[in-house]
Amino acid sequence: MAESYASLGKRIFDIAIALPAIVVLAPILAFVALLVGLKLGTPVLFRQLRPGFMGQPFRIYKFRTMTDAKDAKGNLLPDNERLTRFGRLLRATSIDELPELVNVLKGDMSLVGPRPLLMQYLNRYSAEQARRHEVKPGVTGWAQVNGRNNISWEEKFKMDIWYVDNYSFVLDVKIICMTVLKVLKREGISQRSMATAAEFNPQAFRVDIDKDL
């Protein structure tokens, strides 16, 4: 059962949920796109290369949540200054993630899996942490329903690897149900006192330790 789900069942599961979800949510997606255009400008979608299965890059789609405000030198302002109240609402409700359903249909992502992070993180992972790419990245995942952005990177990666070794149909259904509850409660959206998650930089962490010693 586990092998059949891994080889074909997971893909069928993704399509069976993502396709009708897009159809049902189409009016909401169109309305949100209109609001994003009016409040934050265009393009309404945030597109960025992210590492997918086995680290292969793909372009992720999200609703934009930040403005393009820049300082006098033409540099983008910090995230917390560009993230508007409307953008925070989109993130708090996870509505900004809904366009990722298109990524699921395309086969770039799965409904459930380790979240796709940044391309520059690829050479920062340990061999064990890199195993998170042995499955497709997910719209939600085990780490997201167990702390999301309020847990450390090390904890997230341990949960990601646990998922890689243990995923199943039953677990995926459980994670999706837990995700709905988390979104309704708006838990773990961002790290305390930060607009977005802190950068993963193990080298900087080691330098800080050395200074303390």
Image (cartoon, helix red, strand yellow):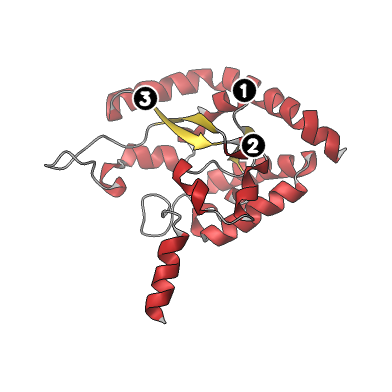
Spatial CA span between label 1 and label 2: 12 Å
Spatial CA span between label 3 and label 1: 20 Å
Q: Position of residue 185 (x, y in %)?
A: 53, 49
Q: Position of residue 132 (x, y in %)?
A: 63, 47
Q: Nearer the viewer, residue 80 or 183?
A: 80
Q: Earlier in the sequence, mark 3 or mark 2?
A: 3
Which residue does the numbered mark 1 point to in the structure image? Answer: 105
* Residue 159 located left or right of residue 117: right
SS assignment at label 3: loop
Q: What's the mark number on residue 44?
A: 3
Q: Amino acid at mark 1?
A: Leu
- Alpha-carbon neighbours of circle 2 within 10 Å: few (<14), some, or many (≥20)? many
Q: Position of residue 18 (x, y in %)?
A: 63, 25
Q: Is residue 186 visible?
A: no
Spatial CA span between label 3 and label 2: 25 Å
Q: Amino acid at mark 3?
A: Val
Q: Nearer the viewer, residue 33 or 154?
A: 154
Judge whether 62 appears above or below 158 on screen. Answer: above
SS assignment at label 1: helix
Single out the mark in the foreground, 3 or 2.
Answer: 2
Asked if the residues shown at circle 1 and circle 2 are in contact, with their CB atoms under 8 angstroms apart, the answer is no
Residue found farthest to the bottom:
213
Residue drawn at the location 71% of the way across and 47% of the way down: 164
- Alpha-carbon neighbours of circle 1 within 10 Å: few (<14), some, or many (≥20)? some
Q: Earlier in the sequence, mark 3 or mark 1?
A: 3
Q: Amino acid at mark 2?
A: Lys
Which residue does the numbered mark 2 point to in the structure image? Answer: 136
* Residue 112 located left or right of residue 28: right
